[in-house]
Image (cartoon, rainbow, N blue to C red):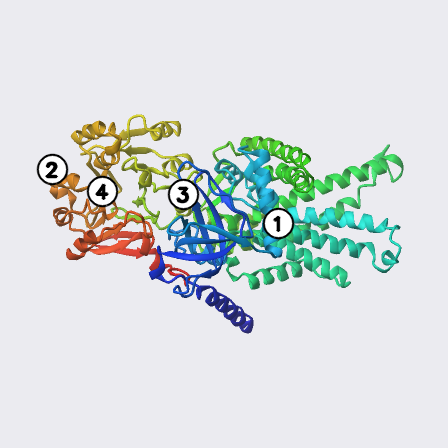
Amino acid sequence: MCAAFLAGYSWAAWRAQLRLAYTLPLEFERRDIQATGIIASVPLSDARRTRFVFKIEQSDPAVPCMPRLVQLSWYAQRGLPPVRIHPGERWTFTVRLVRPHGSANYHAADFEASMLERNLRATGYVRDRPTPPRMVGHANGILITLEGWRDRQHKRINEVLGNAPHTGIVSALAIGLQMGISPEDRRRFTRTGTNHLVAISGLHISLVAGFAAALAGWLWRRSCWISKDWPLRLAAPRVAAVAGAGAGLLYAGLAGFGIPAQRALLMLLIVALSFLSARRVAASAVLAWALAVVVALDPWALMSAGCWLSFGAVAVILLAASASRVTQSKSIDQVTKVKAGGQLFVSGIYSWLAFRWCRMLSGFKAAARIQGAVSLGLIPLTALWFSQVPLLSPLANAFAIPWVSFLVTPLVLIGMVVPAPLDALALQAAHACLVVLAALLDVIAAPSWALYSLRTPDALALALAAFGISWSLLLPGWPLRGAAPILFLPLALPPSSAPAEGEFRMTVLDVGQGAAALIETAHHRLLFDTGPRYDVTSDAGQRIIMPFLRARGIKQLEALVISHADMDHAGGARTVLTELPVVRMRASLAPKHPLWSQARAQQVRDLAACRTGESWVWDGVTFTMLWPDEQSRRGATLKAFQKSRGREARNQVSCVLHVSNAHHAALLPGDIEAREERALLAQQPAALSATILLAPHHGSRTSSTANFLAAVAPRDVVFQVGYRNRFKHPNAGVVARYQAHGITLHRSDQDGAVQFQSIGAKIFVERYRTAHRRYWMGH
């Protein structure tokens, strides 16, 4: 065991060293670099840009350790559509690159780990100057040919379906591209536990392989037209096994070889090899070998939820199926006995009907039992990775699995292989089936309790739940089998880490170039700002804030404060309002801003604008609104009519919140600038004193005046800024000013999320990138 552990550790460390060796030097970030290479992935385009993986073959020799694979964006020129490119094309670009850098937060996805797993060691964009891009040739090869075929299929699907609501699902089922799935579809699948249906996995690969094997076997048995004696030398079942394995390999390649597809393909290949070699291999051994090969090829697979859910689901199915076969065989043994006139007889049509009926009923029971077992067995993993459990998952999957497997997927596959215009008919029929599926899933997902939120479980709760799963799935008759689900109860316990009475905890989240902070007291939670909107499909609320709140077991916000309307502060508010009940909302927004309407639609009871002087006390912690005053609000309203001064007007009325207890205080000033700082100093200088300060306006040169810092006198300041942001926040002069006052500096782009806990007379600080350091951070 120790030798195996050391071998695995050494292998993973060696693989990591190989990948980290090709890391862009810091001095070459954001500098023009000439590079020639190949378009190595299916390009994904929207109205503004085209994104793709670029395999660099030649680059500026002055750049050492140039990454081989980078992810690039090619932005369209104003008024023009994005440039259309295709896999295999060889281009020479002028690029600007940065190291992979993502937000570092508690319980959120790790972008840098994902980039390391995909061997993408830099991200950047294509520049039109000083040398415009030019195509210099075309590459060949099996992988390039495969990517080219995927690209053509993706283009054809978009041509046929256009902006239809479920086009992204069709692309996901056809070629494994899930980027185009709409937020509405993702939310629908999450609430019903049907996400697995749009990831090409064992269900889809088995369907393709089974069809190919059946077709090959049927044709081989009828191959009398072959003049040689091949049909006599090679049995049809062996031909079917080879054909099924080949079809599975091809489909997994078209799907991009995701982890679920890898697992299914490896299991299929192991079964085919064991059949061809006349060896019998236990299903558990097949699963174990598949896991070993996946982890050997990709040691970072264990960091993804897909790996755990994929292998975990199959393990539960195997365990449940072993018990199901016993009960099913017992029921079939009795099906031919039918009562008639007080006598038992086994004969005639009654026997045949009874046998067929009971066999069908037994099959339904077995399928329901296995589906229930999977839903139960994956609860600990879904709680660990997503802090959510879809309670109606068995009901949704009972319809969705056969609907997608035997109707939607075959239609999509037919659309991929038949010529135009027949392919359009198949793809449109598949989309029509998805419309029906979405309507049914909406009905199932409608109850508010359909998705149950759980805190992230600790190791003990996970161990008890895993033991309970194993016990509950054992054969009937095992002692206390029915009581096994009791071991799941620790998963539902409320969080035990809430601050004590009179104390508070503030978590300043890393949302990039934006702001978001959660303040917790013993029984209340306040969210100040919601971070930026990243693109049309995602925002900080979806990516960072909601996963963090769910993992902490927070099911309601007692207050939501939107400091002002700038998108880097209010971009995630729509998601937060949709996903979580909010009791009170304070904001500096125009009267007709759409967030007010959404808050009313979500039944937020207490809605009002931020106003100087409002104060309340929660659990011994005082919250006071210091800004804006009425005069500033009137001035901002006039400036808002002048487009050139709209941003200035919004910053002018930023909400300023002061949070304090008996020993410490925090000041959250939004995007106020020097003028507002002077007004606060004139009106209420004593109220500004704070231990913790969020830097006004991200540390811009127009804020953080010397007099303001002297009045606040913070011990710690946090700059919420994006990595190498275009505004160059924080300003070097402002940073020097804070350092001159002896203030401890924290930066979200360098430290990740920063957490402050006021406990008694002490205040404890934790920087995420320091406390949860990983070897790929900063590389």
Quadrant occupied by the N terminus: bottom right
Label 2 and label 3: CA atoms lie apart by 37 Å
Q: Residues within 10 Å of mark 4 (few under 14, many from 20)?
A: many
Q: Position of residue 278 (x, y in %)?
A: 78, 63
Please give the residue where the numbered disc 4 appears in the rendered image: 669
Please state which amino acid type lies under the numbered disc 2.
Gln
Q: Earlier in the sequence, mark 3 or mark 4?
A: 3
Is the C-beta separation of discs 2 and 4 under 8 Å? no
Q: Position of residue 474 (x, y in %)?
A: 64, 53
Label 2 and label 4: CA atoms lie apart by 15 Å
Please give the residue where the numbered disc 2 appears in the rendered image: 683
Please give the residue where the numbered disc 3 appears in the rendered image: 546
Is the C-beta separation of discs 1 and 2 under 8 Å? no
Q: Residues within 10 Å of mark 3 (few under 14, many from 20)?
A: many
Label 3 and label 4: CA atoms lie apart by 23 Å
Q: Secondary structure at mark 1?
A: helix
Please state which amino acid type lies under the numbered disc 3.
Met
Let me know if residue 739 appears in the view.
yes
